[in-house]
């Protein structure tokens, strides 16, 4: 019975998607001769997994603090909480018996090849994670910077790389501004994260280092050189 429930929970975590929707609206612009933006902006995030639903909303108006609203299953969550209880004076944390330290097996030092492999995999993670989300972007924005050359550079990069094709962007070379809306939707499956982690672990340098930490020699010999 317990194994069946654990298997069902595992399948649920792997194949029930986390669906999210992020929407932002802004009406920000600078007055003539100034760089500071004034106006208002708001954002909303909805995260749904099965019957669980989390909603976060934030609103900002010039001259006022940011207003937050967090709701779980439609019920507002109260912010803040009690901090950790103060320790009683004279009460110390129990530590191990002096002079008796656990013997640790000296581990292998990471080699330069391992460090290089870890850095390369970390650099690839953002792209892999973004592609696993299956995101869809939409929006209509007018933007501008205090320096018109920066606005022009952003437009050149956008047209040269094809970024933001699903967004209707209009540059404003006369003033700093951000006016319009943008929305990002997508879904994340647990098995996709598992595939990403498996690809990282199967890197030969990382795999051999982790397998080398196994103390049981027969299993270590079987798994060694199993990386790709």
Image (cartoon, rainbow, N blue to C red):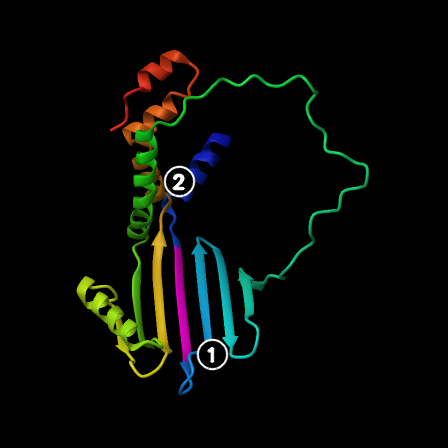
- Foreground: disc 2 or disc 1: 1
Crowd class of label 2 (few under 14; some 14 to 19; many from 20; radius 10 Å): few
Position of residue 76 in the picture relative to residue 86 (left or right): left
> Which residues, given as a range, are shown in magenta?
19-28
Q: Which residue is mark 2?
A: 11
Residue 60 visible, this angle: yes
**In this view, 202 is above or below 170:** above
Query: Residue 164, percent across and down?
Result: 25, 66
Q: Residue 78 or 167: which is nearer the viewer? A: 167
Query: Residue 72, percent across and down?
Result: 54, 59
What is the quadrant of residue 138 in the picture?
bottom left
Which residue is rendered at x = 45% and y = 33% of the image?
4
Q: Which residue is the extreme one toward the right?
A: 90
Q: Earlier in the sequence, mark 2 or mark 1?
A: 2
Crowd class of label 1 (few under 14; some 14 to 19; many from 20; radius 10 Å): some
Query: Residue 37, percent across and down?
Result: 44, 78
Q: Which residue is the extreme one toward the left?
A: 160
Disc number at residue 40?
1
Query: Residue 188, percent across and down?
Result: 36, 51
Which quadrant would the C terminus be assigned to in this image?
top left
Q: Is 80 included in the stretch rendered in magenta?
A: no
Q: Is 20 included in the stretch rendered in magenta?
A: yes
**In this view, 189 is above or below 38:** above
Q: Secondary structure at mark 1?
A: strand
Q: Residue 43 or 35: which is nearer the viewer? A: 35
Residue 198 visible, this angle: no
Which residue is rendered at x = 26% and y = 69% of the image?
154
Magenta stretch, overall SS:
strand
Q: Which residue is the extreme one toward the bottom?
A: 32
Q: Residue 29 or 21: which is nearer the viewer? A: 29
What is the quadrant of residue 67 in the picture?
bottom right
Position of residue 161 in the picture relative to residue 120 (left or right): left
């Amino acid at each position: 019975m317990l194994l069946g429930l654990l298997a069902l929970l595992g399948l649920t975590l792997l194949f029930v998607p986390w669906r999210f929707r992020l929407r932002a609206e802004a009406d920000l612009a600078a007055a003539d001769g100034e760089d500071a933006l004034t106006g208002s902006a708001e954002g909303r995030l909805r995260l749904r997994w099965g019957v669980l639903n989390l909603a976060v909303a934030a609103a900002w108006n010039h001259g006022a603090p940011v207003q937050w609203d967090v709701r779980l299953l439609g019920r507002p969550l109260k912010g803040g909480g009690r901090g950790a209880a103060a320790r009683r004076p004279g009460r110390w944390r129990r530590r191990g018996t002096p002079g008796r330290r656990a013997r640790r097996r000296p581990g292998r030092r990471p080699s330069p090849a391992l460090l290089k492999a870890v850095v390369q995999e970390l650099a690839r993670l953002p792209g892999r994670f973004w592609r696993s989300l299956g995101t869809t972007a939409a929006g209509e924005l007018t933007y501008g910077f205090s320096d018109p050359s920066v606005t022009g550079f952003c437009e050149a990069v956008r047209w040269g790389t094809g970024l933001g094709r699903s967004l209707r962007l209009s540059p404003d070379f006369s003033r700093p501004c951000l006016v319009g809306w943008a929305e990002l939707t997508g879904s994340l499956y647990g098995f996709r994260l598992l595939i990403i982690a498996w690809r990282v672990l199967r890197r030969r340098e990382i795999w051999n280092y982790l397998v080398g930490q196994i103390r049981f020699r027969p299993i270590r010999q079987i798994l060694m050189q199993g990386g790709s």
